[in-house]
């Protein structure tokens, strides 16, 4: 007879069908589970992998309790859980030496601390930038940034995913500098097949120049989520069903650059860059990629269908109510003939 631990695991498998055939079942013997389960099983943190929020703490506890009492059938269930989770996500912490190329700016782009810290600088002669060596096709990208301090008016620090060519896809964070004491503007945009015009802009609820903060992009076939310190700023849903293109067919690399944009960045170009404050420098650390595997056998798996949970939706509404300063979906002057079709969806902000 199955114990309650085994019944719980069986219920988990019924509610989250494993994205593989029964022939790929891994059977783990009891002694192996009892001695090595904590090191063998990677349980993703809720702050890193959104779907893990619902199973993280209970799975950890139940597996520890079950490992001392389950029999052969329980081992089968634990094996299913292990294979299911390991086949959903592949997480890797980055090293700037190994994972990125410094692409322009000469010595204005620098890597420190054995590849754990990177800086970009801008002066009157040039800005600087870097690019990932690898391409990514769906996943979560995390990067900690400390933005240009002081009078950063006219500068833009861009951090984004992009493919190449005239029909490129792109998912943008851009940080628009400002005069000392005035808040940064976080500019977000989504390009599909070379066309953007989907801007939303926000102020932040903290000073992004004093400490490092984590800026994340979750890119799935169903939606794109922009997050700051794991708080969602924006969700861009796949609306292909109503004719809205969505970036899902082109793998993208990670890019970042620091450059002068004083013709538009601060108050529409009215405030120019003060070059007496140069060089302007931004810092990067703790890059991490969680790549979601995308195969036909996983078309109905949890990683694809996952949405924000209830606390995430509440945080999203809070950000959009108090910190959003521009939304293309409400700009009737810009779209006098009618707003883009995705803007009519009642669920665009979840």
Image (tube, rainbow, N blue to C red):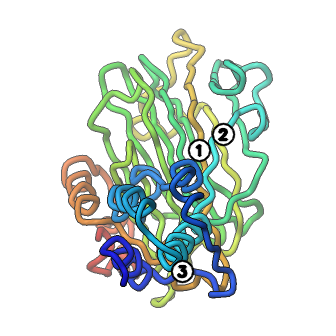
Neighbourhood count class around disc 3 (C-alpha, 10 Å): few under 14, some 14–19, many 20 upward: many
Are the two marked residues, 1 and 2, in contact with CB atoms closer than 8 angstroms? Answer: yes
On residue 94, the disc is 2
Label 1, secondary structure: give it.
strand
Nearer the camera: disc 2 or disc 3: 3
The residue carrying pointer 1 sits among few (fewer than 14), some (14 to 19) or many (20 or more) residues within 10 Å by Cα, namely some
Q: Nearer the viewer, residue 34 or 118?
A: 34
Chain-order first, disc 3 or disc 1 = 3
Residue plotted at (30% across, 21% down): 181
Tell whether label 1 touches label 3 (CB within 8 Å). Answer: no
Marks 3 and 1 sit apart, C-alpha to C-alpha, by 26 Å
Up-down: is 117 above or below 263? above
Tell me the residue at 26%/79% (across/down).
Answer: 346
Q: Give how far across and how far down residue 159 sits, in percent.
A: 57, 43
Where does residue 226 sit, x and y in percent of width and height? 43, 55
Q: Earlier in the sequence, mark 2 or mark 3?
A: 3
Disc 3 is placed on an element classified as loop
Q: Nearer the viewer, residue 279 or 10?
A: 10
Residue at 51% x, 35% y: name it.
144
Q: Is residue 329 left or right of residue 107?
A: left
Q: CA distance from mark 2 to mark 3?
A: 29 Å
Q: Secondary structure at mark 2?
A: loop
**Residue 221, visible in the rendered structure:** no
Residue that badge 3 annotates: 18
Position of residue 28 in the picture relative to residue 325 (left or right): right
Q: Give the side of residue 94 with respect to residue 190, left or right.
A: right
Query: Which residue is identified by label 1?
Result: 288
Residue at 57% of width from left, 51% of height from top? Answer: 36
Give the image quarter of residue 137: bottom right
């Amino acid at each position: 007879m199955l114990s309650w631990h085994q019944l719980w695991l069986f219920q988990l498998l019924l509610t989250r069908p494993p994205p593989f055939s029964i022939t790929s079942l891994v059977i783990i013997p009891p002694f192996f589970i009892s001695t090595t389960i904590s090191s063998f099983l990677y349980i993703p943190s809720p702050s890193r992998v959104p779907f893990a929020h619902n199973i993280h703490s209970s799975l950890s506890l139940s597996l520890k309790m079950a490992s001392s009492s389950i029999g052969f059938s329980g081992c089968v269930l634990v094996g299913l859980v292990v294979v299911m989770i390991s086949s959903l996500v592949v997480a890797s912490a980055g090293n700037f030496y190994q994972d990125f190329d410094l692409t322009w700016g000469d010595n204005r782009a620098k890597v420190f601390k054995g590849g754990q810290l990177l800086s970009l600088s801008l002066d009157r002669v040039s800005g600087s930038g870097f690019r990932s060596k690898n391409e990514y096709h769906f996943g979560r990208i995390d990067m900690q940034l400390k933005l240009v301090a002081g009078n950063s008016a006219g500068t833009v620090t861009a951090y984004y995913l992009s493919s190449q060519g005239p029909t490129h896809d792109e998912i943008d964070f851009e940080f628009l500098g400002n005069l000392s004491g005035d808040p940064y503007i976080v500019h977000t945009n989504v390009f599909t097949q070379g066309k953007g015009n989907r801007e939303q802009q926000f102020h932040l609820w903290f000073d992004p120049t004093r400490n490092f903060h984590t800026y994340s992009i979750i890119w799935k076939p169903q939606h794109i989520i922009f997050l700051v310190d794991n708080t969602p700023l924006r969700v861009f849903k796949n609306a292909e069903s109503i004719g809205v293109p969505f970036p899902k067919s082109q793998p993208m690399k990670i890019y970042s650059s620091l450059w002068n944009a004083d013709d538009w960045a601060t108050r529409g170009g009215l405030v120019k860059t003060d070059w007496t404050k140069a060089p302007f420098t931004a810092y990067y650390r703790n890059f991490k990629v969680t790549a979601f595997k995308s195969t036909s056998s996983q078309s109905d798996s949890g990683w694809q269908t996952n949405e924000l949970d209830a606390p995430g939706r509440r945080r999203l509404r809070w950000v959009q109510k108090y910190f959003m300063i521009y939304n293309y979906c409400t700009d009737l002057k810009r779209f006098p003939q009618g707003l883009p079709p995705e803007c009519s969806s009642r669920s665009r902000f979840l």
